[in-house]
Amino acid sequence: MDGWWLADAWQHSPVYLVSWVFWLVFSITLHELGHGWAAIRCGDRTPIELGHMTWNPAVHIGTPGLIAFFLFGIAWGAMPVNPSRFRGRRDDLIVSAAGPAMNVGLSLVCGTALGLWIALAGGWTSDSISLGSITLYDNVQTFLMLGCGLNAVLVVLNLLPIPPLDGSRILANVYAPYDRLISHGNAPVVGLILFAMVFFYGGGVLWTIGWSVTDFLSEGVLRLIAPRYFEMN
């Protein structure tokens, strides 16, 4: 089944496949729970009433997302909220931003941990990761790199002002004309087209940003705690 993402990821490295599955599922789950926790704090108990305050990823991703994940290695999530229950004027903005904030936190934690791991474990491996030559150092490095890079990508992607991404709700809360624009009946169709264009044509740019964030965070930690590492390399 050459070309299927599962087969390609396994061929690259089993730990790469396991890391991708873990981080995508965990990051989406925590992202959606972030929306839910914020909504509850803002007075909306809809996430609780509909059974979405759970760590079960299948509840958040849903059947279509799970099928897409199996076929293509990508997925999405959803958290039901009712803005009419929010108490504050800016609660919709807070709830919308809570999901990406979780991904920011995960990216920061993984990037910092990656820098610490490189410093403690002795530096970057010079050999490419391949079956039969994977060490514990390589495994942990791959795991943390994917955690940092993937969450950075999710942050940038979700902050794009394209319905139904979180960025569209955030912008709508601070710019009334945009709120009226995305309230138009054709907005969901236009948003779907724009999202597809970003996905098919902007994926490389998103991953360039993700890996740049990973390098920036890990190297920043290394320069703070192990500056001699850069003198030696």
Image (cartoon, helix red, strand yellow):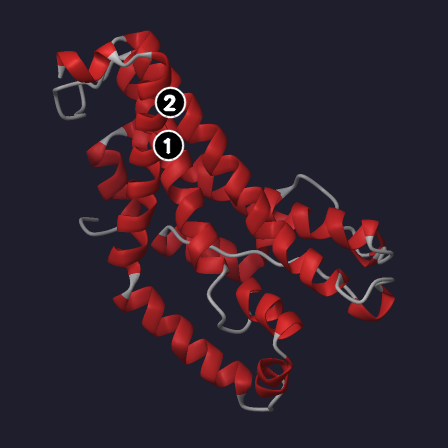
Residue 169 visible somewhere in the drawing = yes
Of 88 and 6, nearer the camera is: 88
Q: Position of residue 86 (x, y in %)?
A: 83, 63
Q: Amino acid at mark 2?
A: Val
* SS for dot 1: helix
- Specify whether 120 is left or right of 102: left
Which quadrant of the figure has residue 179? bottom right
**Front residue (pair 47, 50):** 47
Residue 158, label in figure: none
- Judge the density around disc 2: few (<14), some (14-19), many (≥20) Cα neighbours within 10 Å: many
Side of 81 where 231 appears, left or right: left
Q: Amino acid at mark 1?
A: Leu
Q: Which residue is mark 2?
A: 221
Q: Residue furthest bottom?
A: 185
Identify the residue at image location x=77%, y=55%. Answer: 39
Placement of 210 over or under 65, stated as above or below: above
Query: Who's the residue at 51% across and 43% down the image?
Result: 104
What residue sits 29% from the left and 14% below the top?
A: 137
Task: In the rendered structure, find residue 217 and report the number of the disc placed on it.
Answer: 1
Mark 1 in CB contact with mark 2 (< 8 angstroms):
yes
Q: Position of residue 108 (x, y in %)?
A: 47, 34
Residue at screen point 37% across, 55% down: 71
- Circle 1 residues within 10 Å: few <14, some 14–19, many ≥20: many
